[in-house]
Image (cartoon, helix red, strand yellow):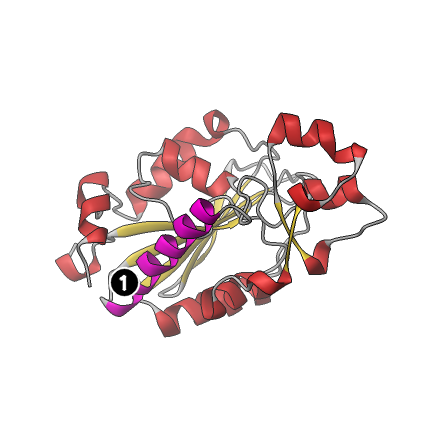
């Protein structure tokens, strides 16, 4: 493979934190990024954040909601960041579980600082034309998440290609009546899309398949930029 085709970053884009967790288990996560633990309900929300950063005026912080229903949840899971578009004051439990940032409290200045650094890294990747594999893992049977249409996936792939030196990897984890374990649905310059015939969201169930996919894409951990590499870029 030519040096200019070698992927230097593997960046999760959601839809949930499964993507980041799987990438980390594959030893391909070298530094934190914006979408690592973010819940994106659709493709448009991913593109909007990449375009405009996080718009803090649209956020609600669960620690500021004084309600007995959330007390035990806060003790067990910590404070969460919710988006106004998904907040229902008449259904606080659902709003909590479908939080925009289930693992981060953006009401904390240190957490905001962390996310600011993540956006700086994303801009460095864009500005320096770093060849990147963006990854989107979809588990539509988890927590009633919805599936993502091919049209929306193509929309994201085109947006990324127009703004970054990159390709998009999509893995759909969904059990069907097909006999295969994994099938490649699309393979072009913008997008490579696999259907993994399983409803499981446990990494160990998919370790071999995901390793094979990364080998097919010539992803090698030693070729990826490390934390210090990305921090030293301008």
Q: Nearer the viewer, residue 119 or 35?
A: 119
| Magenta highlight on residue 122 | yes
Location of residue 234 by image quarter: bottom left
**Where residue 203 appears, x then y in whole percent?**
47, 29
Q: Residue furthest left?
A: 3
> Vertically, is 64 above or below 25?
below
Residue at image point 24% right, 67% down: 129
- Mark yes or no: residue 108 visible: yes
**Where residue 134 appears, x then y in whole percent?**
39, 55
Location of residue 22 by image quarter: top left
| Magenta highlight on residue 232 | no
Magenta span covers which residues?
109-127
Left or right: where 40 falls relative to 69 = left
Q: Which residue is mark 1?
A: 124
Q: Nearer the viewer, residue 209 or 178?
A: 209
> Vertically, is 146 above or below 63?
below
Q: Quadrant of the N terminus?
A: bottom left
Left or right: where 157 falls relative to 31 = right
Tell me the chief SS of the magenta region.
helix
Residue at image point 68% right, 51% down: 146
Disc 1 element: helix
Q: Residues within 10 Å of mark 1 (few under 14, many from 20)?
A: some
Q: Nearer the viewer, residue 64 or 91?
A: 64
- Mark yes or no: residue 150 visible: no
Residue at image point 20% right, 54% down: 6
Total marks placed? 1
Location of residue 161 by image quarter: bottom left
Left or right: where 70 falls relative to 129 = right
Q: Residue furthest bottom?
A: 162
């Amino acid at each position: 493979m030519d040096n200019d085709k070698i992927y230097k970053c593997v960046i999760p884009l959601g839809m949930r934190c499964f993507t980041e967790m799987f990438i980390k288990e594959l030893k391909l996560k070298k530094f934190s990024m914006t979408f690592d633990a973010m819940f994106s309900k659709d493709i448009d929300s991913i593109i909007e954040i990449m375009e405009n950063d996080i718009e803090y005026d649209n956020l609600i912080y669960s620690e500021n909601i004084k309600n007995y229903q959330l007390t035990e949840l806060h003790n067990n899971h910590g404070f969460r960041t919710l988006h106004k578009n998904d907040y229902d004051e008449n259904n606080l439990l659902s709003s909590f579980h479908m939080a925009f940032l289930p693992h981060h409290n953006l009401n904390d200045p240190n957490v905001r600082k962390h996310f600011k650094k993540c956006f700086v890294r994303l801009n460095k990747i864009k500005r320096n034309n770093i060849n990147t594999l963006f990854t989107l893992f979809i588990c539509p049977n988890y927590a009633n998440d919805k599936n993502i249409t091919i049209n929306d996936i193509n929309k994201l792939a085109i947006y990324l290609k127009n703004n970054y030196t990159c390709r998009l990897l999509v893995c759909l984890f969904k059990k069907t009546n097909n006999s295969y374990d994994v099938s490649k649905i699309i393979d072009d310059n913008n997008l490579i899309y696999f259907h993994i015939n399983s409803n499981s969201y446990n990494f160990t169930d998919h370790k071999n398949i995901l390793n094979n996919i990364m080998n097919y894409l010539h992803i090698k951990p030693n070729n990826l930029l490390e934390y210090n590499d990305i921090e030293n870029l301008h």
